[in-house]
Amino acid sequence: MRIPTATYRIQFTPQFGFDNAKAIAAYLADLGISDLYASPIFKARSGSTHGYDIVDATQLNPELGTNESFDALVDEIQSLGMGWLQDIVPNHMAYSSENDYLMDVLEHGPDSSYTDYFDLSWNAPFGDRQERILAPLLGDFYGASLENGHIQLQYEENGLTVNYYSLKLPLRLESYTKFITYNLGKLTRTLGRNHPDFIKLLGILYILKSVPSEVAGKQRQDQIAFIKGLLWELYNTNDAIREFIDENIETFNGEPGNSESFNLLDELLNDQFYRLAFWKVGAEEMNYRRFFTVNELISVKVEELRVFNNTHSLIQKLVEEGKFTGLRIDHIDGLYNPIQYLERLREKTGDVYITVEKILELTEELPENWKIQGTSGYDFLNYVNGVFCQTENELSFDKIYQNFISSRVDYASVVKDKKHLILEKNLAGDIDNLALLLKNVSSKYRYGNDFTLNGLKRAIAEVLTLFPIYRTYITPDGIGDSDRATIQEVIRQAKEQAPLLQNELTFIEKLMLLEFDNSLTQTEREQWIYFVLRMQQYSGPLMAKGVEDTTLYVYNRLLSLNEVGGNPGHFGINLAKFHAFNKQHQETWPHTMNTTATHDTKRGEDVRARLNVLSEIPDEWDQQVNTWSAINRGHRSDRHGFAIPDRNDEYFLYQTLVGAFPFAEQDHASFVERVKDYIIKAIREAKVHTAWLRPDSEYEEACTSFIEKVLNPAISGEFLEAFRPFQARIAEYGIFNSLSQTLLKITAPGVPDLYQGTELWELSLVDPDNRRPVDFEQRRTYLSAIREQVKTDILGLIQELLNDKTDGRIKLFLTAQLLQARTNYVSLFQDGDYVPLEVQGTYANHIIAFARREGNQTAIAIAPRFLTSLIQPGENPNGLSVWQDTRLLLPPETPLTWKNVITQEPLQATETLSIGSAFAHFPVALLVSSAE
């Protein structure tokens, strides 16, 4: 197995394809990256900016380049000794006209060869629901879309389709008969009954009526394709038939303003295997499983072996050819049976490096029986971020936040409320489906015979909203101790909060714990297990939407903690827990990924590093934020006595400005627009005053107007005069947090992952802001100059970088030096023990230090934190004058001679090491020693 030394995440887009990646491969190798980490590169919906809306996993995305350009990229990275870690998407595909598998299902219904590909109600093994597949893709109500002429019939070589802007859906076979026979008498009179082409048309009608009862599957598809070909030939060779079909198209498409004229098209649409609907319908009625609440992403039944083999055939081929050396699995928790999936994947791909996108709560552990190397790194992100939050100031921040918004806020209560909101507003249809499943199970037992559908739905809602983790992993083979404990605790809490649902909750507990009655038949056991595995697929989406995409935009005590996989109810992480986390990683998941930024993070890694500085200065933050609010009071809008933005959104905005304000003056204009776009997304996600389902344009416009005013020097000179000096101080201290974070990520147990562009300052906000193009030429130029000066005058270079930290070169320098060390001492950092080190002296709590040890080799990482009380703005945390008597206790039996691989300086030590000496010239240190 190839274990990456360091990965670099690339977001492929139509504007940044294989050729562009090839052009930067040498730069990445020079930086010290061992493995390109690629966003999905399989055929996606046209224009996809992220690649997760796949339409065919058996093809590369042609918008990224040709197969030849992909091979050229692979050749380039392999010539540089690099590997390829590929993000794969087993859970879902795009609900799109370009998805040929899905279009076949919509056209042929149960006779399609691909009905088992998608998670449709048709495929429920213990259900008998055969209603039309929902297509909730309209921008307005169905009736309005139809009568406004936005839904149109069209005829082309592939047959009749229903078009709605770029959406193009096929018509079922029976619709052709209705369409062709409409006003056929006119064509009879034009051509005559004995005309050869008219006879051919009658023959086509006869075959159309015969196909359904005579053939199925592939044979049916072939025969229909043959019929379509005959009809298309007649259309192109006989003017009368062309005119007849065109007139029918025009008639069926109706006349806006004439409601009756749309009856024909309406009847035709009602005969399809799908039901076109307003996109908001998907929140309350749903008969296919989606990715979270995204109607345009339909889930795949990858648990079906045929589906698994097809969707992974190209992946397997590229692994076997050595082009993919690792795989990252997107949204593992969405799968019906993740354990079975991982076993199949390992069997298909052999001994390849595999990580999973898995959100772990702070005390949750990754299942040890998973055949993988670890997670994609959100767990590390939240630990390393939390250790820079000064935990002892939690009560002060509670007071500041609650006084500012004039309300007491309890994080756990907000989470529960928002989960209920998501269930009621966004996942109602999905919960209805679960309740129906449970009703079918309970009706077979005397103790469940009186359960109502409404009662079961309420019980399911209570259980899901109380889930403290993304999901459990119960399988037909049984339930683990950890999952058992989780289920029992959730049911206990649910019974306390919903005492009238005691019986229903007891029944759900019995099901989830697989406490089968001896009287159950094998079919009843399978039905029971089916419900349990289905139930598990919905706790994850609810957690993601209720917490990540709602609560984290509502609970704004300290935004640096509001991150994917984070729990802002915990005000930071103490040092002992950080060390324990790393030590456990080294023992159980030594090759897991460590990240600090991804395409999904809520804010850039250096935005978080800045905001953590606020945790050190609660009194000053309190004074500043209230001063700003008082200055800006006149910029807020008034609606019926209610000020916009509200106090919570205003508090959110000020933290955002402090964290993301650009260093460079030339970036200010674009920053205003970025923040306006961001705040619209944030307040819609919060779902308090506006939401994606019910936008409030007045509130949104008032918020963007507020931003424009407070960031306009001509209007808000007083605010900016008060804001900018404070923000600049926070940004400077944030730089040191960022450097420390970089050191910890690259030296801790696990594989360090860099998100594209983050080798310089990363001050992005949530997507799509964090997916903006990266200036690689600038980075290449910077790195080349740094490499040259390292050879001749490294201390001079460091002083230059410290004198001008705002351009980010200091972070690039540190990253390159650390990755060089990881490359030079691969086994030490991949396999070495993790040893927390004790720090003594005046500022012991301001140092994070640990050793990595393997054989006779040792590396020591030393990072500062909480610097606002140690140095003044403009100063660097270097030297004995800053650190005084603070010293590190060295591990026993280590040599006395060390080398700081960042500065290339030798260092002498005794049983202790002076922090001031270690930080003589640079704000962090990595010391390496060996028997030599």
Image: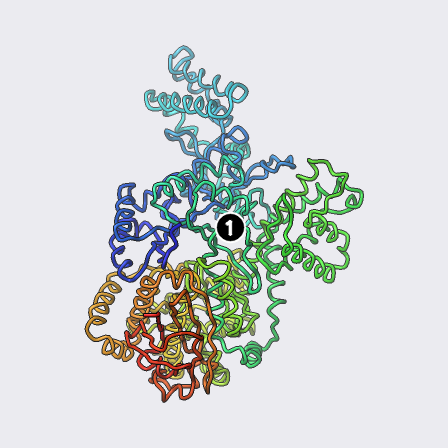
Residue 169 percent coordinates (x, y): 45, 36
The relative height of residue 716 versus residue 426 in the rendered view (above or below) is below
Q: Judge left or right: residue 305 versus residue 494.
A: left
Q: Judge left or right: residue 602 versus residue 917.
A: right
The residue at the point 76 percent across, 55 percent down is 502
Quadrant where the C terminus sits is: bottom left
The residue at the point 29 percent across, 41 percent down is 67
Q: Secondary structure at mark 1?
A: helix
Query: Local crowd at mark 1 within 10 Å, few (<14), some, or many (≥20)?
Result: many
Q: Could you say which quadrant of the image residue 422 lies in? A: bottom right
Residue 770 percent coordinates (x, y): 38, 61
Is residue 699 in view from this perspective? no
Is residue 175 in view from this perspective? yes
The residue at the point 58 percent across, 36 percent down is 123
Residue annotated with mark 1:
332
Furthest toward the top, the residue is 194
Image mark count: 1
Q: How is the image coloured?
A: rainbow
The relative height of residue 780 versus residue 324 in the rendered view (above or below) is below
Front-most of 770 and 824? 824
